[in-house]
Amino acid sequence: MAIPVSPLATALPHLPPIAGVRFGAMAAGIRYKGRTDLVMAEFAPGTTVAGVFTRNLCPGAPVDWCRAALPHGSARGLVVNAGNANVFTGRVGAEAAKATAEAAAGLIGAKPAEVFIGSTGVIGEQLPVERITTALPALHATLTPDGWEAAARGIMTTDTFPKGATRVAKIGGVPVRISGIAKGSGMIAPDMATMLCFIATDAKIPSTALQRLLSRGVQTSFNCTTVDSDTSTSDTVLLFATGQAGNPEVPAEGGAMLRDFTLKLNEILLDLALQVIRDGEGAQKLVQINVSGAVSGPSAKRVAMAIANSPLVKTAIAGEDANWGRIVMAVGKAGEPADRDRLSVSVGGVWMAREGGVVPGYDEAPVVAHMKGREIVIDVDLGLKNGRATVWTCDLTHGYIDINGSYRS
Amino acid sequence: MAIPVSPLATALPHLPPIAGVRFGAMAAGIRYKGRTDLVMAEFAPGTTVAGVFTRNLCPGAPVDWCRAALPHGSARGLVVNAGNANVFTGRVGAEAAKATAEAAAGLIGAKPAEVFIGSTGVIGEQLPVERITTALPALHATLTPDGWEAAARGIMTTDTFPKGATRVAKIGGVPVRISGIAKGSGMIAPDMATMLCFIATDAKIPSTALQRLLSRGVQTSFNCTTVDSDTSTSDTVLLFATGQAGNPEVPAEGGAMLRDFTLKLNEILLDLALQVIRDGEGAQKLVQINVSGAVSGPSAKRVAMAIANSPLVKTAIAGEDANWGRIVMAVGKAGEPADRDRLSVSVGGVWMAREGGVVPGYDEAPVVAHMKGREIVIDVDLGLKNGRATVWTCDLTHGYIDINGSYRS
């Protein structure tokens, strides 16, 4: 089954070199034929690293490996394969992750714990690790500062477009570059529901400060998006800082000096997260849900996520129906403080329901026009306190069933 | 759009009269044309009542009415309409519920608080209550002990088949009958996702004992089923006991005397709950999920519900793919204690994954045959302690998108 490119796709921006980062990709025949499926990066000595991983309690062996390596705070390499997730593969899977890291470390001249690993693809099949270790020497020989686009394409599984973002920030007046690539959510064969994101900067930032920025940044970007409420066993976001930009020393706790860097990093995280949603399985519309008036921020987010994950809301949007009754239902099922008689709902900026009842004679024409567009905005005001949150999702269409209801074979 | 009868449909059993219960149905033109859409019941003086309602925090006016009436413990009438849920209709909606109860109470010669109300259908439109109050006198004149089937049909919205169940139990050696009807889950126009269930018995049981039985009974029946994780604003289960069977006095706390009655009541609750799932939107397969080895019963149920609500698991079942990797993912995302390396998964009785890895060379043929059937059984053993739970769902198919993605108009 050929999946057409998402109608919400964005063009891959030019991703210029970042000092201290060399990328490459090659076809290692792990599962796909006629395309690259193995990506490697080498980072300059002194590169610091931060990471966040899936909260799924049945994570893949690569996630286990990265979690164990992260406390060292130092990174020299990255190896990513597409087509096999190395998840639920037991002791053999853990050994495959170790063998991959050891092979790359040998080529780079680093410790295995300085090599990070990402795998996505089918679950429960043994990773053909010898195809990776056999391919790595040739791949290592091709690494180049211009390899970002090749890497963005090489990590795709059933994505319909490559995903990347880049920004320039200033630290103590010195410009530093941040670039990231991501994959995820366009599935053609089942078991491919995984999200990977790799970001690198030439800034010099201690790993403790880096980890704090990343952990906070994902809360308002990746962790505010959902395609289908199913949490992958492989989700990984890694941030590498090569320290080549010559910026002034950043203290371990980060602080005010990183204000602009934080801003730009958060922009990249949100940009990449929305690119993943734009490639959501079967997505025809990008949906932004703003909840205000909740008793707290976390409460607002849980209400927003209940709306974003409601199959009835998502199918209504696919049908271009501004069905505010289903939004009310989703608010009510979230289990968060809400008062039916203070609840207001707006679609495309038009308030259709106010304080517990339909707005008599509201203008339907702009709502109908808004629902026919590609980007839908829903506002919900709970009318209680000042808690706010924004989350993003896509609609639920026949494409989702087509993609996920087909046989694995 | 005409929705065909669910391939999982069961035939409505004969529902014989129950002493002290008279039912009737008529076409009141509330929303539908050419079919009954208003149902009424009258119960003998002395009838006790128990009820459980949606936990959605934005409930409909009829749910508010029933919740307020229930503590009196006494019931003389029931009025149910199809086509309009009287949800999110503000003060006017509350007045419509009161007017309905008052009109029925006047005809029966009872207090309004002894009349219970159920409404399902579109959300956010004012209930045309005068059509109900105008029709009630004629409807009341037609009530008959043989009206069960008419009632089962009259409460349907977009159900594709009527739902009912009946059993005989013994209390102190005296036979009593329990019968119930339900509606729900076959949706053609949006906003109809609502579940109603009405059960009556001729047994004489105090309302406190009745409430205890019902509250417990729904935990292992209705509350263990899910079509799409969306909780309706109208869900209602009411149990009426007319006291006409001549059984010995039952103490307020119930107790051992009600053992057989409890057994048969629970059978009816589960039977009706599964009929609702069999009529799930777009359902092609009924799915039973058994989780064992959890740290507790509630933990097992949350894991089972995470599997049952996973769009990726449900689409895989629709595609007749025994995709145990997605089951592992759903176990891991449930957030309950689980150890990947002790987890085992079986489909159709064949263990495909054992203690953290695929079972080498397991026989795929019986699994493939099982997946082609109408009733799918998934067993998950967490391998931790003795917590168990069983839940039921249906698959997620193009039919769900067809039904819920169409315009309301």
Image (tube, coloured by chain):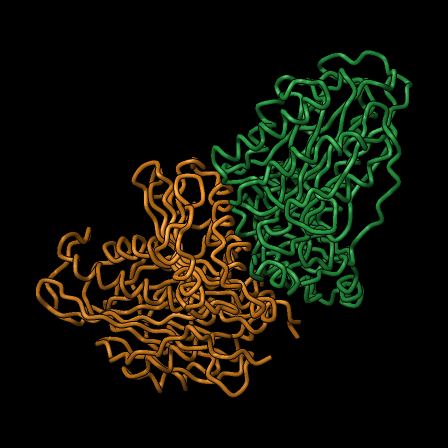
Chain colours: A orange, B green
What residue appears at the point 36 percent right and 52 percent down from the top-left corner?
Answer: A290
For the N terminus of chain A, the image quarter is bottom right
Rendered image quadrant of residue B263? top right
For the C terminus of chain A, the image quarter is bottom right
Asked whether residue B192 appears in the rendered view, the answer is yes
What residue appears at the point 51 percent right and 68 percent down from the top-left corner?
Answer: A281
Asked whether residue A59 appears in the rendered view, the answer is no
Name the residue nearer the viewer: A1 or A203. Answer: A1
Q: Position of residue A140 (x, y in %)?
A: 37, 82
Q: Is residue A156 found left or right of A51 in the rendered image?
A: right
Q: Position of residue A130 (x, y in %)?
A: 53, 78
Residue B36 lies, with reference to residue A169, above or below; the image says: above
Q: Position of residue A165 (x, y in %)?
A: 30, 72
Residue B156 lies, with reference to residue B261, above or below; the image says: below
Rendered image quadrant of residue A349? bottom left
Residue A30 lies, with reference to residue A211, above or below; the image says: below
Q: Total label count?
A: 0
Q: Is residue B296 found left or right of A155 in the rendered image?
A: right
What residue appears at the point 25 percent right and 54 percent down from the top-left corner?
Answer: A208
Q: Is residue A227 found left or right of B29 in the rendered image?
A: left
Q: Position of residue B77 (x, y in %)?
A: 71, 26
Residue A188 lies, with reference to residue A390, above or below; the image says: below
What residue appears at the point 34 percent right and 45 percent down from the top-left corner?
Answer: A292
